[in-house]
């Protein structure tokens, strides 16, 4: 039986249209695949009925090692004492568990972590700005700040800014930085040697850890007022 030519053409057109629709439907289904969230991992050791091994190496509430003990028996001992069975070494064979007050243990651990965090100090870089022709009084004030920063455990960035014709006398700035280095070498070390950054000369020093908290913050006494006229005459 012969199929009319117009029917063949119509069938071809329908196939051409249905194929992209089918592909689009498949792509949509692939995109709308449900998202599976990751299972949350519980922090901290396993305790009581969460310990599902046949036996454990048991340490009782007094700290005595009872050796390998059936887990159910260890749990009964903990419950009879009004305490918890806590897994303290899960990788041992068998795991090591201890009878203790888990709530109190957790509180002590959090307290220790808080104290350790309080003792940690974030090292900062303090900037001390000077001039190449800084006078004696200003220099001493700046150096007291430098010693105070080192005593607190911070680093110090000494910055000298040159203005106008001072750029022709960069050796003056270098002399100031070398003086700072010499006066702090007992409790600090150079971490970044003097270098020019545009119109600024910088040097970074860090405190020697063993000297933190032991540095004489006051340093040398200030220049007496009687020395002022002599400097002026010079």
Image: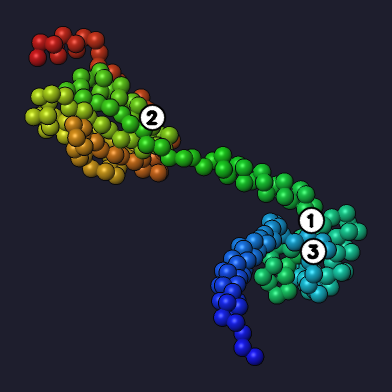
Q: Residues within 10 Å of mark 2 (few under 14, many from 20)?
A: some
Q: Answer yes or no: do the residues labelled 1 and 2 have beta carbons within 8 Å?
A: no
Counting from the top left corner in percent of width and height, residue 75 is at 85, 64
Q: Nearer the viewer, residue 73 or 62?
A: 73
Q: Residues within 10 Å of mark 1 (few under 14, many from 20)?
A: many
Counting from the top left corner in percent of width and height, residue 195 is at 20, 40
- Horizontal side, residue 232 vs residue 46: left or right: left
Question: What residue would you read off at disc 2?
Answer: 148
Q: Nearer the viewer, residue 156 or 26?
A: 26
Q: Nearer the viewer, residue 88 or 60?
A: 88
Task: Please give the name of the residue rendered at 30% of the width and 25% of the height, measured from the top-left corner.
Answer: 142
Counting from the top left corner in percent of width and height, residue 88 is at 71, 62
Q: Quadrant of residue 116?
A: top right
- Horizontal side, residue 166 vs residue 19: left or right: left
User: In what quadrant of the picture does the C terminus appear?
Assistant: top left
Asked whether residue 215 appears in the rendered view, the answer is no
Question: What residue would you read off at disc 1?
Answer: 100
How far apart marks 1 and 2 lie (CA) works out to 47 Å
- Give the structural element (helix, strand or loop) at label 3: helix
Say above or below: 152 vs 24: above
- Give the structural element (helix, strand or loop) at label 2: helix
Asked whether residue 164 appears in the rendered view, the answer is yes
Say above or below: 181 vs 161: below
Numbered disc in front, either 2 or 3:
3
Q: Earlier in the sequence, mark 1 or mark 2?
A: 1
Q: Earlier in the sequence, mark 3 or mark 1?
A: 3
Say above or below: 162 vs 85: above
Q: Quadrant of residue 172?
A: top left
Question: What residue would you read off at disc 3?
Answer: 50
Task: Please give the name of the residue rendered at 35% of the width and 26% of the height, measured from the top-left corner.
Answer: 145
């Amino acid at each position: 039986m012969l199929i009319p030519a117009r029917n063949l053409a119509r069938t071809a057109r329908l196939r051409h249209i249905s194929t992209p629709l089918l592909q689009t439907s498949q792509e949509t289904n692939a995109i709308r695949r449900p998202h599976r969230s990751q299972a949350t991992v519980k922090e901290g050791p396993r305790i009581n009925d969460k310990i599902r091994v046949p036996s454990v190496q048991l340490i009782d509430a007094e700290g005595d090692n009872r050796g390998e003990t059936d887990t159910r028996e260890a749990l009964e001992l903990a419950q009879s004492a009004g305490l918890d069975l806590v897994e303290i070494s899960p990788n041992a064979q068998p795991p090591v568990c201890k009878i203790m007050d888990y709530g109190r243990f957790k509180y002590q651990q959090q307290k220790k972590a808080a104290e350790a965090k309080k003792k940690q100090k974030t090292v900062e870089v303090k900037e001390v700005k000077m001039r190449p022709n800084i006078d004696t009084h200003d220099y001493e004030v700046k150096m007291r700040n430098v010693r105070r920063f080192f005593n607190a455990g911070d680093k110090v960035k000494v910055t000298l800014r040159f203005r106008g014709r001072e750029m022709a006398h960069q050796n003056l700035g270098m002399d100031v930085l070398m003086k700072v280095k010499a006066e702090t070498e007992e409790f600090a070390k150079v971490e970044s040697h003097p270098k020019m950054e545009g119109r600024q000369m910088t040097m970074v020093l860090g405190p020697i850890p063993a000297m933190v908290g032991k540095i004489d913050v006051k340093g040398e006494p200030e220049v007496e007022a009687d020395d002022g006229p002599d400097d002026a005459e010079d």
